[in-house]
Image (cartoon, rainbow, N blue to C red):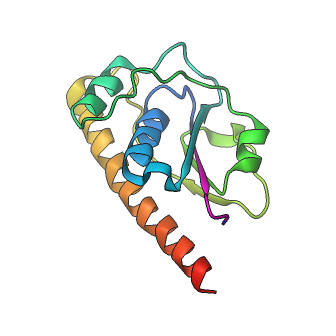
Amino acid sequence: MTNQPTVLFVCVHNAGRSQMAAGYLRHLAGDRITVLSAGSAPGDKVNPVAVQAMAEEGIDIGGALPTILTTGAVQESDVVITMGCGDTCPIFPGKRYEDWVLEDPAGQGIDMVRGVRNEIKRRVQALVRDVDDSLAAGRRS
């Protein structure tokens, strides 16, 4: 990994799960990690219930816009985390890939979305620790 790793979160519509994950990573990692998010078939706007759930955590994702997934975004990322995009996500050798199986919050109520949000938070916290540990190990070698 480079001194400033890049993490890309991908879900189908880039309107819920990937946007919440990106919001958490920006919040928790600050400027230590470059954060990208994209979708294989991006929606028109971020899911308003996801925006509400993240606002409860003090994180504003209301200004985010769903973005189309490009091979360039995957190529420039050190870590690519997919969330239900299936076979539509391009794969490149040497990248770290994870697939986070999470329920899709599209069309769901706030209680369900809070559950997805909380699971995303737990996974992003673990990811930040892992990336920080990898960076520290790289500085020692």
For this view, does 83 lie left or right of residue 138?
left
Q: Position of residue 95 (x, y in %)?
A: 71, 60
Q: Position of residue 112 (x, y in %)?
A: 26, 32
Quadrant housing residue 49: top left
Quadrant housing residue 24: top left
Quadrant housing residue 62: top left
Residue 1 magenta-highlighted? no
Q: Residue at x 40, y 36 (%)?
A: 20
Furthest-top residue in view?
44
Q: Position of residue 80 (x, y in %)?
A: 62, 51
Furthest-bottom residue in view?
141
From the viewer's side, name the closer residue of 132 and 66.
Answer: 132
For the C terminus, the quadrant is: bottom right
| Up/down of 139 relative to 46, above or below | below
Q: Residue at x 42, y 32 (%)?
A: 104
Q: Which residues are magenta?
A: 2-9
Q: Residue at x 67, y 26 (%)?
A: 68
Q: Position of residue 27 (x, y in %)?
A: 38, 45
| Up/down of 115 relative to 138, above or below | above
